[in-house]
Amino acid sequence: VFRLSSVFGSGKSQHPNTILDMARECLDSGQLTVWDSGKRMMQYVFIDNVIKYIYESFFLKPGIYNLGSNEYVSVADTAKLIADFFGAKIIFLKDKKEGATLPFMDNNKLKNASKDYFTNFSTAIAKYLGSFKKSI
């Protein structure tokens, strides 16, 4: 069983996805809105890494594994990567309260049972946004 953090990557998202929503806002309006100061911490996982671990699951002992990246990034840092990629401006809405930070999901059990397939967040997001930008 894999416990997933927020998944991003190419394909059709069935549920709201922060990174996809941010990219769409940049493309639609040329700006990106962040509530409060964007200090909320998030853990994302790139779909390519999820797929690698699904293939690898045939060789894992049965159990529960956290499938979240090695990185814990703020909403502001994520917004900056996305806004910079699309040349958009970030607007901070200080009067809006941002959501609660969820605890970091330790993924060491999975990495110890397999390999560390996690792609660096900035590399993964650039790869994803590049494919997203080409598809529009």
Image: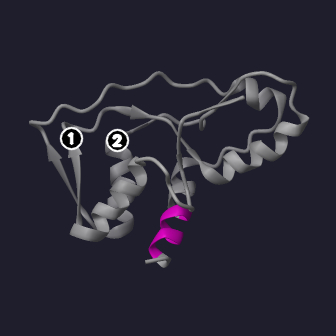
Dot 1, crowdedness within 10 Å: few (<14), some or many (≥20)? Answer: some
Q: Quadrant of residue 21?
A: bottom left
Q: Nearer the viewer, residue 48 or 73?
A: 48
Q: Which residue is mark 2?
A: 75
Magenta residues (range): 127-133
**Quadrant the C terminus occupies:** bottom left
Q: Magenta stretch: dominant SS? A: helix
Q: Are discs 2 and 1 less than 8 Å apart at CB?
A: yes
Q: Quadrant of residue 89?
A: bottom left
Earlier sequence position, callout 2 versus callout 1: 1
Disc 2 element:
helix
Is 123 placed above or below 114 here? Answer: below
Disc 1 element:
strand
Seen at 34% across and 63% down, the residue is 24
Residue 125 painted magenta: no
**Quadrant the N terminus occupies:** top right
What amino acid is labelled 2 in the image?
Answer: Val
Is 82 placed above or below 102 here? Answer: below
Dot 2, crowdedness within 10 Å: few (<14), some or many (≥20)? Answer: many
Position of 96 with respect to 78 (left or right) is left
